[in-house]
Amino acid sequence: MVEGGLGGGPPPEETKYSPDYEALFKERTEHEVERKRLVEAFTKDNFTEELPEIEIGSAQEVELYVDSVLGEALDAKYGKEGESYRAYHERRHSQLVEESLLECIDAGEKVCPELVLGMSREDFEALSPVEQEKKLVVQRAYAKALAWGHDFVQEADVDPETGKLVRYRGMEGDFDTPEGNEAKSAVALRKFLRSFKYLDGSGVFDDISDEQIWADVAATLPDFDFGPGGKGVYQPGLTAETSFAGVSLAMGDLRGAESRGFDWAAEGSDAEFREVNVWITEGIEKGFENLEYTNLKGKSEQELKDEAVVAALSWLKNASSFDRSQGERSAEFINDMVSDERAKELFARRFMKLDVVREGEVQEGGVSFYEPKIPDVARSLADVHEGGLAQMPEEFIPPGFEILRERFGDSGKESSSEELGSPFVEGVQSIYETNAALSDRRFDIIRGRVAFLKNMGKHDEAFNYIMGEMEFMDRMSEEELAEHMS
């Protein structure tokens, strides 16, 4: 049972809107039958079973179900002990997306609450404080469900010729005739959300339309353009019309880990490599000589291991171009598609990763928000990398860092988002450039180590070494690797 979920952990802190959580905590066992039915229903693929209606006192109680129901069902479907293990699309990915999405929602509630709700400032101010909080609580619960539900269906087959995973991506059809994993995930998410009713019989998520659920999940769907001058990996469904939650979800899904720093990006990249290259995983577990894939038959164990090394090196080499392209896509979207300067800065700071420092509550038109302050740029970037950027060799410091230092200096200059505007975004691609530089460095070191081992005739050691790298565990530091290579 997930700590803090149904059946375990302390009740959440009470807010001025929420009901008596001590009483709710005692009553959770009454929902256990419904919870188990939800888990069972969400472990299936057709989602045709009528779900139980669950009466709750507050949208905050829905959050208790998200981890418990969707998390447990994800484990049953795609966890290591599940029906179809997915090394990347399992619980951890959803947790990281949730963390990124809630950062945006929580910051948005302070800076631009009406945008979070998709309302005008006038309509938001017309609400009572209790109504404002109630709507924001619902929106936060919806965001959490989005994070866990957007990738909930991961139908795929293994190509009988190559041994690679083929995902059935797509957002075609509608709620009645969904085609593609994203479309089916939207169907599952909608059924989950519509299960929750207040005590008066109204739906908790009545303010969230079916059209928004569909569009928010559709915003995550990736497309690929690798031609000359192409966009690389991008999200065509992420547009100026996408909701605040949808933007936070889509950018967190594709760029959330990358924008946190190299280690996060590398962990996710390595997990996806393992998920896609089923033949390598099976070769390690069952023996390469036992693989039945058409294109791999007739090859010796050593030939297949060498092909695995080449596949891993190719994947690692492409990681740097992915990071660079995601920096470009983030800047393009924030500059061109986000019109509100408060939201522009919020997304820039989360996904271009300069930490937000907010000082002093400001009253404007009766609405409270926090005036942003630009922190010491060098310190902020160094903090993101746990000190790594400030200590990096000069040749690894990307131009974006110098642009920031020149623009803002190191004095902690205060500036409002209106003063910053689009040029602010243009200068903060350094996190992605740094990731790319470190990816290149990692690739060069690994390639050198593999070449060194092969030249010594140690092919199996080269294979074991790079597979250990792609597991992203027990990895030597760069200094240790460099020392071994010398």
Image (cartoon, grey):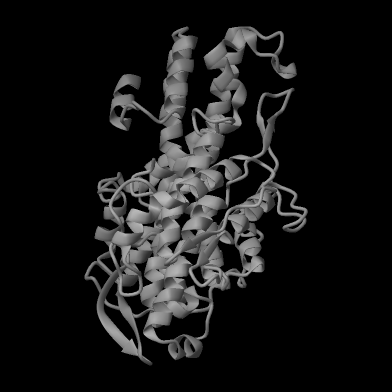
Residue under the point 63% across and 9% down: 290
The quarter of the displayed image where residue 277 is located: top right
Task: Please provide percent x and percent y for residue 143.
Answer: 49, 61
Is there any visible trace of residue 395 in the rendered image?
yes
Using residue 114 as the reference point, say whether residue 260 is left or right of it.
left
Q: Nearer the viewer, residue 309 or 252?
A: 252
Above or below 387: residue 157? above
For the C terminus, the quadrant is: top left
Residue under the point 57% across and 21% down: 280
Using residue 18 as the reference point, say whether residue 208 is left or right of it.
right
Above or below 236: residue 86? above
Is there any visible trace of residue 232 in the rendered image?
no
Q: Nearer the viewer, residue 401 or 24?
A: 24
Above or below 332: residue 289? above
Q: Nearer the viewer, residue 169 or 127?
A: 127
Task: Please provide percent x and percent y for residue 212.
Answer: 62, 67
Task: Please provide percent x and percent y for residue 311.
Answer: 58, 26
Residue under the point 53% across and 35% down: 76
For the N terminus, the quadrant is: top left
Q: Total number of numbered labels? A: 0
Residue under the point 50% across and 56% down: 145
Q: Nearer the viewer, residue 72 or 296?
A: 72
Task: Please provide percent x and percent y for residue 356.
Answer: 32, 67
Above or below 172: residue 43? above
